[in-house]
Amino acid sequence: MCQRCLPSPRLKMAVVTFLVTYALTAIIVARETTWLPRSWSFYLVNVITNVLLVSLLTCVTMPVAARAFRSWLY
C-alpha cells in the first residue's frame, strides 16, 4: 500500500486517545457517584473528574496504550 493511503500516526494516536479517555471517563464518572457527596456543585465535581482523568492519562494509561498499539501506531 502507498504511504499516502495509510492513516497518519497523528490520526491513529487520536483514535487510541479517544478509546482510552472514553473508558476512563466511564469508570471515573460511575465511581464518583459513590465517592463524592451529591451536594457538591457540578463545577467542583467536574474539576475533580478532569484532574483524575488527566493524571491517569498522562502517568498510567497512555504510556501503556502507546506501547500496546506501537506496531499499529508507527
Image (cartoon, rainbow, N blue to C red):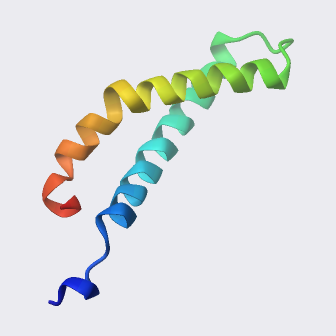
Image point 33% across, 38% down: which residue? 62
Quarter holding the N terminus?
bottom left
Q: Position of residue 45 (x, y in %)?
A: 73, 21
User: Is 26 above or below relative to 60?
Assistant: below
Image quarter for residue 57?
top left
Q: Position of residue 8 (x, y in %)?
A: 31, 71
For residue 71, side relative to residue 46 (left or right)? left
User: Is 48 above or below relative to 22?
Assistant: above
Image point 39% across, 30% down: which residue? 58
Quarter holding the C terminus?
bottom left
Image point 42% across, 57% down: which residue? 14
For residue 26, side relative to residue 34 (left or right)? left
**In-front residue for pair 36/4:** 4
For residue 51, side relative to residue 16 (left or right)? right
User: Is 62 above or below relative to 3?
Assistant: above
Image quarter for residue 60?
top left
Q: How many marks?
A: 0
For residue 65, side relative to residue 21 (left or right)? left
Q: Position of residue 28 (x, y in %)?
A: 55, 27
Q: Position of residue 59 (x, y in %)?
A: 35, 24
Image point 29% across, 64% down: which residue? 9
**In-front residue for pair 37/20:** 20
| Residue extending furthest toward the front | 4
**In-front residue for pair 62/20:** 62
